[in-house]
Image (cartoon, rainbow, N blue to C red):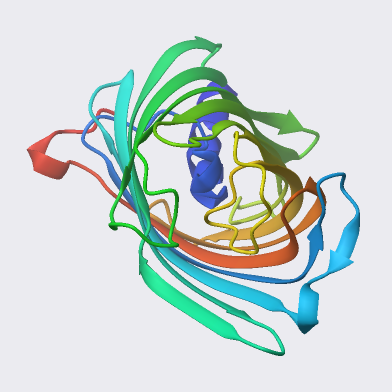
């Protein structure tokens, strides 16, 4: 049973959105590549006390994010990953409009698998450096940052179905004028839909609590500093084989403060290559 759960979990982790980093160990010499595309749309805002209002002058904010996530297994206990985003957004109302596009903040991380329970549940610690890939502008804070993230993930069986779960919480700090301090959290639970474990449905909850001395509201979600939100998501993932999977995610911001109320949709492809740099993967 343990061996079966191990093999199934590898497939499940391919279908879980890598925004949650899954948490299942990436084997030494394995390279995971995940390009993704997401679209965000908002016509309403939460004020500083959480009341919902329409954007002024029939305003609408839309954005797209094309990103590349990659993770490489250095050893059985250490993996490195990098995220490179390209952001494009458009803000318009009855009197004006503004657009911006370019590279966003790169994230460079080391993930440590510190412990496990029966090789089913894994505890992780991840350290991340955030580096802006732009000068001054409206694609982010333009500030360096660091994050420490703790996680628990794993898999098991409920009746004839296999499940995967993930819980994570990260504390992030940016550096500079009005630099925000943030708590970033997410949790997900996925369940297989078929006997061959090719299809999975995942429910998730995630959010950010950000504090800064700069309290002013901005309609640009990439430069907001003092705000909070929680969003709920549902994902469908299909695994074509042990190397390739595709998933679709829809999410809705359900509560918040000093930020936009919006909907988000994304599609991601996950592919992994074994024995990169001639390193043998021991199964």
Compared with 115, 236 (above or below) is below
Residue 225 drawn above or below residue 209: below
Residue 173 position in % (x across, y down): 47, 28
Q: Which residue is depicted at the point 44% across and 48% down?
A: 141
* Nearest to the observer: residue 151 or residue 271: 151
Rendering coords of residue 224 (x, y %): 59, 51
Image coords of residue 264 (percent x, y): 67, 65
Q: Point out the image quarter for the N terminus.
A: top right
- In the figure, residue 66 lies in which quadrant? bottom left
Image x and y of residue 203, in percent: 75, 48
- Does residue 73 appear left or right of residue 196 in this picture? left
Q: Residue at x 31, y 20 (%)?
A: 76
Residue located at (49% from left, 46% from top) = 18
Which residue ends up furthest to the left in the rendered image?
278
Residue that extends furthest to the right in the rendered view of this protein: 51
Tell me if 113 is positioned left or right of 252 in this view: left
> What is the tally of numbered marks visible in this picture?
0
Residue located 69% across and 84% down the image: 93
Question: Viewed as shown, does residue 32 lie left or right of 189?
Answer: left
């Amino acid at each position: 049973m343990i061996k079966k759960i191990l093999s199934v979990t590898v497939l499940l982790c391919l279908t879980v959105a890598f925004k949650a980093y899954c948490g299942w160990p990436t084997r030494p010499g394995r390279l995971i590549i995940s390009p993704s595309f997401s679209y965000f749309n908002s016509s309403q805002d939460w004020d500083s006390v959480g009341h919902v209002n329409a954007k002024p002058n029939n305003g609408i904010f839309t954005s797209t994010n094309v990103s590349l996530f990659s993770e490489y297994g250095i050893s059985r206990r250490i993996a490195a990953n990098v995220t490179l985003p390209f952001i494009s957004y458009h803000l318009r109302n009855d009197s004006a409009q503004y657009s911006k596009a370019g590279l966003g903040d790169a994230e460079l991380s080391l993930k440590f698998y510190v412990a496990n329970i029966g090789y089913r549940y894994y505890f992780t610690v991840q350290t991340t450096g955030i580096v802006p890939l732009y000068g001054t502008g409206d694609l982010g804070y333009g500030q360096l940052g660091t994050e420490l993230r703790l996680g628990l993930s794993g898999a098991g069986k409920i009746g004839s179905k296999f499940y995967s779960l993930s819980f994570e919480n990260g504390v992030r700090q940016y550096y500079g004028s009005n630099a925000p301090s943030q708590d970033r959290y997410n949790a997900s639970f996925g369940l297989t839909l078929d006997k061959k474990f090719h299809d999975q449905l995942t429910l998730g909850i995630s959010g950010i609590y950000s504090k800064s001395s700069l309290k002013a509201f901005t309609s640009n979600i990439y430069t907001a500093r003092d705000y909070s939100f929680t969003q709920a998501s549902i994902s469908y993932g299909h695994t074509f084989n042990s190397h390739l999977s595709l998933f679709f995610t829809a999410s809705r911001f359900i509560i918040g403060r000093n930020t936009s109320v919006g909907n988000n949709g994304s599609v991601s492809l996950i592919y992994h290559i074994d024995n990169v740099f001639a390193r043998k993967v021991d199964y």
